[in-house]
Image (cartoon, grey):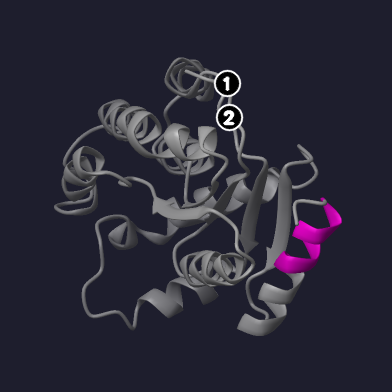
Amino acid sequence: MNKKKGFFITFEGCEGTGKSTQSKKLYEYLKTKNNKIIYTREPGGCKEAEQIRKILVNGHVNKWDGITESLLHNAARKIHLEKTIIPALNNNNWVICDRFIDSTNAYQGAGQGVPIDFLKNLSNIVCQDIRPDLTIVFDMDIEKSLNRINTRMDKNRYEKFDINFHKKINQYFKSLKNKNKRYFFVDADDTINNIFNKIIKEIHKRKMI
């Protein structure tokens, strides 16, 4: 894999925290600044990875074990990196991605009990030297975030897991605070505009724009 040249920003958090809304909002904002930019997501982000996504987000919550699920996520990530993320970064594009490696560590590691060392080794092989420049983590009381998704007509597979699963994910994301300078935490219970303004301020602070 070639060394990346563009900025890579990922959005992480539990279900219902509003990260998808904010990631799309940032994408639209940066387009107005004449930035070369793409918006993508995981699992997914290219034709082949989207096919794997359909397998992952549909069906019964316990249709396979965490190891199998981890392998599927990383298979999707491998092709997503090769076909979408790396070419964009090497072309000096910004990449805004809804979920990345931290979600795998949270959902399959903390949530499904897959050993973190296994996930890290797998990630090192799949991602090599590709890591986000900035990861925005959406922090929110888990019961509040789950109440948001309870209003949805068509829940995906991950949204159907029980509250204990989601509590484990929430605790994992909280554990990332102050762990690495690439993480920036926002209060997801704030207003959409306030959250967005904080994100823009942080990007300026890091001299990315």
| Callout 1: SS | loop
Is the Cβ of the residue at disc 2 closer than 8 Å to that at disc 1?
Answer: yes
- Name the foreground residue: 133 vs 1: 1
Residue found 68% across the figure and 80% down from its top: 190
Instruction: Name above or below for residue 82 compared with residue 149.
Output: above
Q: Which residues are magenta?
A: 199-206
Q: Residues within 10 Å of mark 1 (few under 14, many from 20)?
A: few
Question: Which percent across, then down, holds residue 128?
Answer: 52, 18
- Kindly report the secondary structure that dominates the magenta region of the rendered protein: helix
* 128 in relation to 57, above or below: above
User: For mark 1, what is the residue?
Assistant: 129
Residue 107 is left or right of residue 78, and the answer is: right
- Of the two numbered discs 2 and 1 on the same chain, state the one appearing first in sequence: 2
Instruction: State the residue at coordinates (25%, 56%).
Output: 157
Is residue 100 covered in magenta?
Answer: no
**Separation (CA) of disc 2 from disc 1:** 9 Å
Q: Position of residue 19 (x, y in %)?
A: 52, 65
Which label lies toward us, 2 or 1?
A: 2
Asked if 171 appears above or below 74 in the picture, the reply is below
Say which amino acid is labelled 1.
Asp
85 relative to 125, above or below: below
Q: Which residue is mark 2?
A: 4
Instruction: Kindly tell me whether residue 87 is visible in this rendering.
Output: yes
